[in-house]
Amino acid sequence: MLTLRTLTLSLLLTIVVASVGSGLLLDKLYSELYSSEQTNKDLTQAQLEAIGSQLSKILRKLENKEEFIQAWQEENSPIFLEVINRDDIGIPEKLLQELETTGNITLYSSTSLSYYSFLKEGGNYPDAGSYLVIRSPLATNHNQPKWLPALFTIIFYTLLMLIVFAWLFPLIRRLQTMQLSAKKLGEGDLSARITPSVVSHIKDIELEFNRMAQRIEELVSDISLLSSAISHEMRAPLAKLQFGLDALREEEDEETRRVYQDRLDKVIADMTNLIETLLRYARLDKNIAQLPKDEVDLLELCARLSAAVTQAKNIASNSATASIDISINAKNPFYIVKGDVFYLNLLLENLLANAVKYGRGKILISLDQHENKILLTIEDNGSGIKEDFKQNIFKPFIRGEETKYEGGVPRVPQKGYGLGMALVKRIADLHNVDIEITASAALGGAKFSLLFT
């Protein structure tokens, strides 16, 4: 994930690379342009020392050194040549001692290069000796224009700004796109999304924005649906309460009044159950941050729920034909996933209840594992789910159509508020579980496939 720290380091690295790269490029360009224009009349230190060494050998052998020096100067040579004594040499005593020890030294000034050589004439005493001095102008570029440094400075900063702008331009464009999408979202366009770009420094932030927008759209849709559904679901029991209270006021028979009171208690219990179901659905969003990641064995959970559902159904049944048969198909002894055991139990409980409610008594649960993914399927032998209804089955207060048993016998009307599958979808989203609804090839009814990753 591209964090703010990574983004900052990337920008700093770009600036450093751009600075160093531009500097090296301009330095190489400068060397290429002006290295060939240096005057050939100027000498380097090595060349001057080589000439001085040869001239020293020659002058030591000559008796009339003045004639040689005069003839040298008449040739208009850029190299100045003279022989001086110790008193006129004009260098610090420390350097003079080094000269007399080593025999020669080379000194620099702001404009020239000087070579000193000790000729050692007049005996073994330094005061009686003479010294050869050779001077040459420093090798400089005399043709460089005065405006050249300013030009190269301008080119350097221009290249630096272009490279930094090339890095910042995609970021600015993506931030502008995000700003427009956020503005649309704030104005009520809940379908506003950001189309991810191939060149983007904040791609992860864009994807998070899209997920946030999708979640907001779902929440607003849920709120709208809940508002309308609550008013619809509460209207009927409130009307029953009003009718029962009116009847209770007019009724004088004690036995009949007790019957009315029992009915009112049942209506109040139904309303309380509805409110608790709504609160359970609403609290799921608040529990996202606190959702624990425990190790849950899906096989054990399915076995426990299947036994409980089968026992409850068979006890409540009055005939053998109404009993329930749940089979579990699993190859491994354990199927471990990470999640909250309470909510995963609620998810499977609602799916099994849905299979019992709309099936014909036979349910097949299958578990299969491929690497780190676990596939759990729940199939029933009911009439299945229509294609146009699959898109709405996970919405709150949406109930499936009542089916009939074979032979045309009508099913006993099922009770519920249409929140079971909505809870299933919300819990699956919290656990990153993909749900797919297809037709069961084995039993002929509906098949719910849950992929745990």
Image: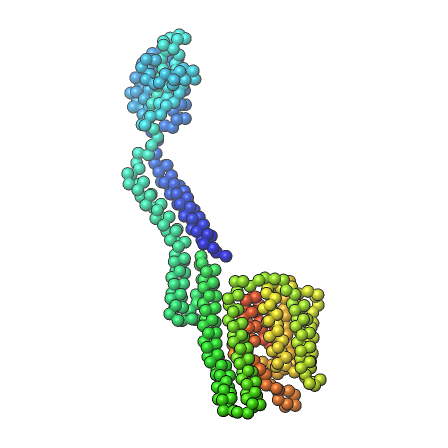
Rendered image quadrant of residue 102: top left
**Observer-nearest of 451 and 312:** 312
Q: In this view, does 90 lie to the left or right of 361?
A: left
Rendered image quadrant of residue 345: bottom right
Q: Which residue is painted at 56% across and 90% down in the image?
A: 254
**Observer-nearest of 447 and 237:** 237
**Observer-nearest of 380 and 98:** 380
Residue 255: image location, x then y, percent: 58, 90
Q: Is residue 253 above or below residue 79?
A: below
Q: Is any part of residue 252 visible from this angle?
A: yes
Q: Is residue 279 above or below residue 52?
A: below
Rendered image quadrant of residue 453: bottom right
**Observer-nearest of 208 and 297:** 297
Q: Which residue is painted at 65% across and 88% down in the image?
A: 406
Residue 272: image location, x then y, percent: 53, 77
Q: Which residue is painted at 59% across and 65% down in the image?
A: 340
Residue 126: image location, x then y, percent: 38, 10
Q: Which residue lies furthest to the top in this view?
A: 123
Q: Is any part of residue 364 visible from this angle?
A: no
